[in-house]
Amino acid sequence: MFDRILVPVDLTDKNAAAVARALALASPGAEIVLLHVIERIEDDAAELEAFYRRLEGRARAGLDGLAARVARSGRRARTEVVVGRRVEEIVEAAARLACDLVVLTSHTIERGAPGRDWLTISYRVALLAPCSVLLVRSRKPPSRARSPRRAGARPPR
């Protein structure tokens, strides 16, 4: 059981699995920290600050629903919205808040898929976080069943 769990969310439906897993692993009086990171655009100008404030307002509204779910479970909910680089902000929040665990959603990457970046956000967080990290699949991974041809069977003639 964990006392402070960080759950980075992007406010899509795929985060439900990570929140559910965090609740299952949380001790009865635990605090669940829901973190949303707004990715800062490189070389951004001061005129984008109003844009970031609007995104922050929308993110806070989205986090309210998740926080209510956490509160209904009897755990304490805390929400944070930050603007920055996702991996760095997640790792920094885990350290600053002295989290026991980071639970985040990951997705399956097919091997050899062209243009796929193996260094996903979840992978980099897992390498850099100051605490344990649990990657939760947002969907069922593709079937690993082998086709008859791949298994060595000859096709029918």
Image (cartoon, helix red, strand yellow):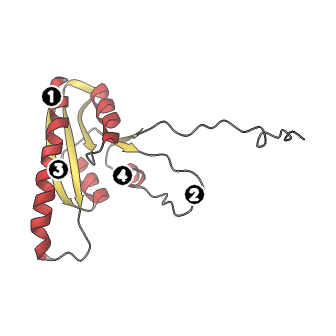
Q: Is residue 1 visible?
A: no
Tell me, for residue 71, which label it has, or none: 1
The residue to which callout 2 is attached is: 113
User: Which of disc 1 and disc 3 is earlier in sequence?
Assistant: 3
Query: SS class of the residue under badge 1?
Result: helix
Q: Quadrant of the C terminus?
A: top right
In the rendered image of this protein, does residue 142 appear above or below residue 129?
above
Q: Secondary structure at mark 3?
A: helix
- Asked if 5 appears above or below 71 in the picture, the reply is below
Q: Where, quadrant-wise, is the N terminus in this rendering? A: top left
The numbered mark at residue 125 is 4
How many other residues sit within 10 Å of disc 3, few (<14), some (14-19) or many (≥20)?
many
Does the rendering let one see residue 89?
yes
Tell me whether the residue at label 3 lies in contact with that at label 1, contact meaning CB atoms closer than 8 angstroms: no
- Amino acid at dot 2: Ala
**Circle nearer the N terminus (4, 1):** 1
